[in-house]
Image: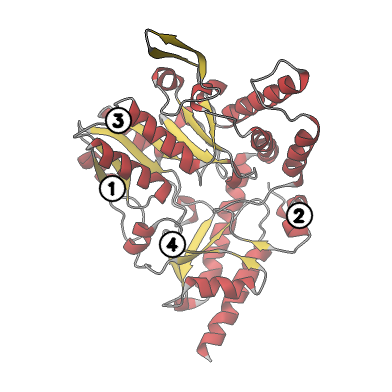
C-alpha cells in the first residue's frame, strides 16, 4: 500500500514549497535519491563511456550499462540489449519510424494504423514517414468518450498494414487499451506493433513479453527520473537485423575504405542505435528512479492512482453541470488522469486560478488536438494527473478551489 503522506517527504517541491502537484502526466517530480545519485556520479565517477581504458571511464561505462539492465528487468525484457536509450518518447518513436523506413519496411502503397486518440508524438512521425514513403495512414476512430473503437480494428487492418501504433494509455482521458488483444489482431496480418508507453510504464506493471508488442517507447522524466532520457525497447531479433538510420560515434565496430567505398561494420544492439555521446548522467538517474518505484511496487502504484482517480471523479461530479469530465468515468478503465472543462471558460484561466491556490495542473490541448476536437473540447481541457506523492487532500484542495471559482462565476 502506498503511504503518500510519507513519500511526500522525498520530494522537495512538495515538502519545501507546499506544492499541490497534479501534473505528473506531463513530467513527474524527482525524489531526493534520484537527484543525489546524479550529483554523486557527476562529482566522483563521470567520464565518457566506451571510450577510455582508464578507471573512471570504466566505472562510468559500467554504470551506464547497468542502467540498461535495470530498465530491461523493469519492463520484462529478455535482454538489456533490447533497451535503447534516447532523449524521450518522442525521439524513440521518431527513431523507430526512420529505422523502419530506412530498412524499406514501409514503402509505397503500405498502410500504417494509428488512432484518433494519439499524442502527436505517436501520430506525426507516422504521418510524415507515410508522406515520404508514399504510404497511407489509416485511423481508428474514437467513440463519444474518446476511446478508440478497437472493435473496428479488424476491418481497418489489411495485408497492406505494416505498422499498428497506439498509446497504451491516453494522456487526455487516461483510458488504458488492451495492448495484447490489439497486438494479436495486428500480428495476424503481419503488422509490427508499436506501443507508446509514456503514460503506462510509470504507473502500471508493464511486461513487454506479456503484452506481445514488438516495440515500446517511454520517457524517464515521467517516472521520477530526469529529463533527457527515453527508452526504445524492441525485440532483439528485430534490432539485430535493422540498420540504424543515424550513424556516428559509438555505433560502429569498424569503418574501412575498400575500393573507394566506405564499409561499415555496425555495433551490436543497443549501441548501434545510440549515436554520439549518450545520456550518461541521466541513465544513472533513471536507474535510481526504477529502483525507487520497485521498492514501492508497481501494483501498489496502480492501485493508489485508481483510488485517487475514483475519488477525484466523485469530487468533481459534486460541482454539478459546471464541470464536464472527459473520457470514461469508470476508474477501472483508466489510469490516474482526469481531464475536464468548465463550459466555455478558457482552460488556461482555470489553470491560473488554481495556481493562485498553489495547485499545478496542465491546461490546453495536451498535444492531442484531434482527440479534443472529437470530444467537443476544441479549446482544450484542464488535466489533473496523479502519482505516488498525491493524497486525497490534494483532490480536496482541487475541488474546493474549483468550487470557489464556480461561486465567483455565479456572482
- Which residue is the site of mark 3? 191
Distance (Cα) linking label 3 and label 1: 15 Å
Left or right: residue 392 versus residue 219 is right
Say which quarter of the image contains residue 167: top left
- Which residue is the site of mark 2? 12
On the image, the x and y values in percent for residue 54 come to 75, 17
Q: Is residue 348 above or below residue 283?
A: below
Say which quarter of the image contains residue 93: top left
Look at discs 2 and 1 and give the one toward the viewer: 2
Q: Residue furthest front?
A: 260
Cβ atoms under marks 2 and 4 closer than 8 Å: no
On the image, the x and y values in percent for residue 68 come to 60, 27
Q: Earlier in the sequence, mark 3 or mark 4?
A: 3
Distance (Cα) linking label 1 and label 4: 20 Å
- Which residue is the site of mark 1? 140
Label 4 element class: loop
- Which residue is the site of mark 4? 365
Q: Earlier in the sequence, mark 3 or mark 2?
A: 2
On the image, the x and y values in percent for residue 196 come to 44, 41
Of residues 310 and 265, which is closer to you in this image? 265
On the image, the x and y values in percent for residue 147 come to 36, 53
Q: Earlier in the sequence, mark 2 or mark 4?
A: 2
Distance (Cα) linking label 3 and label 4: 30 Å
Q: Is residue 41 above or below residue 332?
A: above
Q: Is residue 212 visible?
A: no
Amino acid at each position: 500500500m502506498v503511504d503518500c503522506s510519507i513519500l511526500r517527504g522525498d520530494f522537495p517541491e512538495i515538502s519545501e514549497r507546499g506544492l499541490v502537484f497534479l501534473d505528473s502526466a506531463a513530467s513527474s517530480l524527482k525524489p531526493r535519491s534520484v537527484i543525489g545519485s546524479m550529483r554523486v556520479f557527476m562529482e566522483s565517477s563521470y567520464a565518457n563511456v566506451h571510450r577510455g581504458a582508464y578507471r573512471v571511464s570504466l566505472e562510468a561505462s559500467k554504470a551506464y550499462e547497468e542502467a540498461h539492465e535495470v530498465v530491461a528487468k523493469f519492463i520484462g525484457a529478455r535482454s538489456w540489449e533490447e533497451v535503447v536509450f534516447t532523449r524521450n518518447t518522442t525521439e524513440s518513436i521518431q527513431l523507430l519510424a526512420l529505422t523502419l523506413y530506412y530498412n524499406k519496411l514501409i514503402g509505397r502503397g503500405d498502410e500504417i494504423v494509428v488512432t484518433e486518440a494519439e499524442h502527436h508524438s505517436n501520430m506525426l512521425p507516422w504521418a510524415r514517414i507515410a508522406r515520404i514513403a508514399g504510404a497511407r495512414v489509416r485511423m481508428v476512430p474514437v467513440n463519444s468518450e474518446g476511446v478508440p473503437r478497437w472493435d473496428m480494428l479488424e476491418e481497418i487492418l489489411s495485408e497492406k498494414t505494416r505498422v499498428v501504433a497506439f498509446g497504451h494509455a491516453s494522456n487526455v482521458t487516461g483510458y488504458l487499451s488492451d495492448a495484447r488483444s490489439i497486438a494479436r489482431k495486428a500480428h495476424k496480418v503481419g503488422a509490427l506493433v508499436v506501443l507508446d508507453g509514456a503514460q503506462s510504464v510509470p504507473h502500471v506493471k508493464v511486461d513487454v513479453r506479456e503484452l506481445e508488442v514488438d516495440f515500446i517507447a517511454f520517457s524517464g522524466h515521467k517516472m521520477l527520473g530526469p529529463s533527457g532520457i527515453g527508452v526504445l525497447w524492441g525485440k532483439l531479433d528485430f534490432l539485430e537485423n535493422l540498420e540504424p538510420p543515424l550513424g556516428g560515434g559509438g555505433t560502429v565496430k569498424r569503418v574501412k575504405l575498400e575500393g573507394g567505398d566506405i564499409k561499415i561494420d555496425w555495433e551490436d544492439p543497443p549501441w548501434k542505435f545510440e549515436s554520439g555521446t549518450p545520456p550518461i548522467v541521466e541513465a544513472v538517474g533513471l536507474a535510481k528512479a526504477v529502483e525507487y518505484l520497485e521498492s514501492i511496487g508497481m501494483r501498489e502504484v496502480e492501485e493508489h492512482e485508481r483510488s485517487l482517480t475514483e475519488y477525484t471523479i466523485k469530487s468533481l461530479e459534486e460541482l454539478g453541470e459546471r464541470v464536464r469530465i472527459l473520457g470514461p468515468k469508470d476508474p477501472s478503465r483508466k489510469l490516474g488522469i482526469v481531464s475536464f472543462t468548465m463550459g466555455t471558460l478558457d482552460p488556461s484561466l482555470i489553470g491560473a486560478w488554481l495556481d493562485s491556490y498553489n495547485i499545478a495542473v496542465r491546461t490546453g490541448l495536451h498535444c492531442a488536438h484531434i482527440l479534443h476536437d472529437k470530444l467537443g473540447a476544441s479549446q482544450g481541457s484542464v488535466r489533473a494527473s496523479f502519482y505516488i506523492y498525491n493524497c486525497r487532500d490534494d483532490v480536496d484542495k482541487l475541488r474546493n478551489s474549483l468550487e470557489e471559482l464556480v461561486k465567483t462565476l455565479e456572482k
